[in-house]
Amino acid sequence: MPEAKSNTTFLQRIIVPLGLALLTVLFFAPVLLTNNDLGGSDFEQIHYPLLKFVVNSVYTGEIPLWNPHQFLGYSVVGNPQYGLLYPPNWLLLIFRNDIYSGVAFIVALHVWWMAYGLTIFYQQWGASKFAACVGAIVVAFGGFVGSKIYAGHYAVLLTVAWLPWMMAGYCYAYQKGTWQSAIWGGIALGLAILAGHPQFAYLGGVGLGLLWLHALFMRDNNQARLRVTRQFILVVVLGLLLGIGSWLPTLDYQDQTVRGQAERTLDFANQHAVPLRQLVALVVPNTFGVPNADVGYWGEPFYEEMTGYVGWLPFLFLFLGGAWPQKRFALALIFFGVVMALGAYGGLYALQYYLVPPARGFRAPGRFLIFTSIGFGMILALGMTALQYPQEKTTHFVMLVSRRLGLPLLIICSGAAIAFAIFGDALAEKPQQADFLAEQLAWATCFLFLALIALWAWRYSKAQFVLGLIGLIAFLNVLFYSQPLLIAEDVQLSEVWQDATNIPTTSYGRIAQIGTPIGIINGSSWTGHYSSQGYDPIAPNGWFTLMDATGIYIQDAASATNRLFGVRYVVAGQPLENYGFGSAQYFNQILPESQYFFYENPTTLARAYITQRYEIEENDQAAIQRILQGEVDRGDVILLDKMPNCTPSGRGGTATIVDYQPNQVVVEVEADGAGILVLGDQYDPDWMVRVNGQEAQLLRVNTTFRGVCVPDGASTVEFSYRPTTFFFALVLGGLGWFLILAMLFYKFFLPIVFAK
């Protein structure tokens, strides 16, 4: 008998995660069960090539702290979206030869994990296990998550999966009241930070703050309020400690990035706020089109920042049962998410901007719709629980919802569908839009009708299978709208980069695309080439400032800027002379068999060279103007922002890069006298340089590049990337993880092993 009870308990424990796993496989079936891959702009443009670079680097024996393949090089540890220290990302090492499948697996894993976390969170608020699952399903497989998959927001998907676990962990912490109970919420927050999207880690902190305020409001004495506050502080502090390996290097690197140097204004933070009229998409999705459909999208940009659909049932269940404190918190989440999504127009978002300085670097208020989705999921879970354990007034509420809310909505939707079908020319800007809206409203009517039929069936039978039918309708409702957002296709490295593999991946000479982008701009991180371009929110400010000042002439492959960038190879969609610049005379066409136009400039400025003399120009803007006028692109003279500790002889010399790794560059120098070695890579104060084993002064050359004084004769120069804050954070965070895991081992594992 005890064994049978144990088996039953085990089955009860796994039934929820197993059921959610099956639904996750069904949702991702177009990818997981086929030879297709996850398409999506950011997947293809950013994450696939950069993750491939990290995996390849690890297989060659080096953990990359710096990526030399994009821009002129930029920090990996300072860019949280790499998720270098996030354990689930390490699974990609298994998928070295198929990064696409690895990313799909990890994304699906996190969607499942989010659904499971929401199930636990809703149960903490009084929902039954089945009802909590249904509420979790409409959120995890709903419009908010689906739109992020469509956009390819990899780091967002990884981070947001931990939000319900943070909230559930804090609920557990203040219920238990011990400091050990805060560990689970702290671990969830720490992993959310390591997952790589700071804004959604911050939103997780906002969620914790909302729970804390609710807990304070519900406590009737100061001692209880002090306890929930203490637990809140413990969760946040522990999370920040465990996630320090991501947030501290990111914070330190901000001053070297375009985003960090940009002026922080409310207008910037308010970008992609949801207009009031587009909130109708919470009720009837796609009322402003879908970007990956023939009709396109005609709402405010961008679609993925405006979407949070969870189906009809949560709206119908707003008036069903459930304890008022729990329902009040769910309604507060819905209201808070909507008001914040409106951005500055809602008032609350502007207040946050002024009162919370760290939030000023974030934009896209529409992302606060995650709280609206979670709130609606809770409403559904509590309503389903009321149906599962009905009281006398429940039937009355169901009848009220059906007649007073459901039927009017059904009439409005069906009437609107007919109106757009018949009078579309007058109601929409384009006939195609009218037809699309008529179709969307018709489907919305069908799902609403099914929901009302299911509620009608419950009133007369109250059987368990009817509840199962309601849950199925809820899942099919969100699946119908969200799964098409999952772009399943055969993703391949763009053809231009496939052809570029015929160009040697030498450290001498960068490659650049000229004209309209004809390939993945980060393709060089995949192939191992070195590009003077890149696509990443964390672009280095030195590179960007020089490129931006060049303006349209950045398209001139032989411009002074591109010569300094070391552009040796060029790929274009048409002959180089067609662009109207003087580049063609310096470049020779290569790879004639390619459908693209590849060129090589054998006389470009070397990536490493000895300059003859220097001039001091402390003002960067003045230095840039001198660069654009062609004063320094020959390499015989450079501009420095401060005096070096040497005097060049003016006789020059030779420099040869003998070892070029992500974190280290070794240059052999033969100087004809004392001089300055210039390395045409992005300057960063965390790079250290040694000359013949002795630490030397790192110089900032031509506003953007690295340099160092070298003595007469033969020398070995070693540049090493040593981000101090990262190593400090690694030690501190590693110690935190060690202590936490050791305590969990002592508290949970040892008692099981040595149990009598």
Image (tube, rainbow, N blue to C red):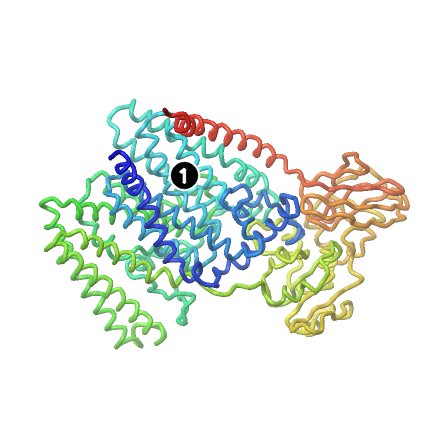
The picture places residue 112, in percent across and down from the top left corner, at 38, 49
Q: Is residue 633 above or below residue 216?
A: below
Q: Quadrant of residue 117?
A: top left
- In this rendering, the count of numbered labels is 1
Answer few, some or many: residues within 10 Å of disc 1's Cα (few below 14, many 20 plus, some between 14 and 19). many
Q: Nearer the viewer, residue 376 or 351?
A: 376
Which kind of residue does numbered mark 1 sit on?
Gly
Q: Residue at x 63, y 65 (%)?
A: 498
Q: Nearer the viewer, residue 36 or 119?
A: 36
Q: Is residue 198 above or below residue 185?
A: below
The picture places residue 641, in percent across and down from the top left corner, at 73, 43
Q: Residue at x 50, y 56 (%)?
A: 101
The picture places residue 648, in percent across and down from the top left corner, at 86, 43
The picture places residue 600, in percent across and down from the top left corner, at 75, 65
Could you tell whether 396 is left or right of 689 in the image?
A: left
Q: Nearer the viewer, residue 704 or 318?
A: 318
Q: Does residue 517 show up?
A: no
Quadrant into which the N terminus falls: top left
Q: Secondary structure at mark 1?
A: helix
Q: Residue at x 20, y 65 (%)?
A: 412
Residue extending farthest to the top is 223
Quadrant into which the C terminus falls: top left
**Residue with the mark numbered 1:** 205
Q: Residue at x 29, y 61 (%)?
A: 284
Q: Does residue 73 show up?
A: yes
